[in-house]
Image: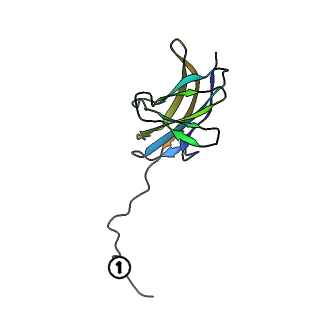
Amino acid sequence: MDNSTIIQFDTMPLGIRTARPGEKVTLLAIVQNISPYELIFAMNIFVDDLPYISCKWAYLTEYGEWVPAAPGPYEGMVSIPPGGIAAFMGDFIMPAQDVRATSWSYWWGEQWVQDASAYLDIAAVAPPPEFRNFSITEYSRV
């Protein structure tokens, strides 16, 4: 039974699809509870063979404000009311090759149930060339 939908899975800032090796890349997954019940949700984000990305969440209040998760053992989980929206964010360091980032939403029933998923591809780009020891070796006036 689908109880969630991933509204958006993107980078922060939005729309970035390239990164230099060694750069920090922030991912954002926005999930909406489409069930008629208040459910506890968690989000996993994996990037190819990199270690699991720990996600922190924030939720959208009825006033349109994002409220971040309180630190603690449950900071990766959030209770979302019917129709409610929460954002999950996580970071990774870009490796030297292209990667595919995948997010999955889970909700708690009698056990964790994998629900919606989304992915995006991020290309590794070479750093700009560096100029070192630039000097003028000859000069003539015309």
Residue found at x 45% / y 31%: 75
Q: Is residue 97 in view from this perspective?
A: no
Residue beneath disc 1:
138
Q: Nearer the viewer, residue 10 or 136?
A: 10
Residue found at x 52% / y 30%: 102
Coloring basis for residues:
rainbow
Q: Is residue 3 in view from this perspective?
A: yes
Q: Nearer the viewer, residue 120 or 40?
A: 40
Furthest residue toward front: 63
Furthest residue toward bottom: 142
Label count reads: 1
Placement of the N terminus among the 4 image quadrants: top right
Q: Residues within 10 Å of mark 1 (few under 14, many from 20)?
A: few
x, y percent for residue 10: 57, 39
Left or right side of 88 for 95: left
x, y percent for residue 16: 55, 46
x, y percent for residue 27: 51, 39
Placement of the C terminus among the 4 image quadrants: bottom left
Residue found at x 37% / y 82%: 139
Quarter holding residue 22 = top left
x, y percent for residue 98: 48, 38
Q: Secondary structure at mark 1?
A: loop
Query: Which three-letter amino acid code belongs to the residue tagged 1?
Result: Glu
Q: Nearer the viewer, residue 123 or 1?
A: 1
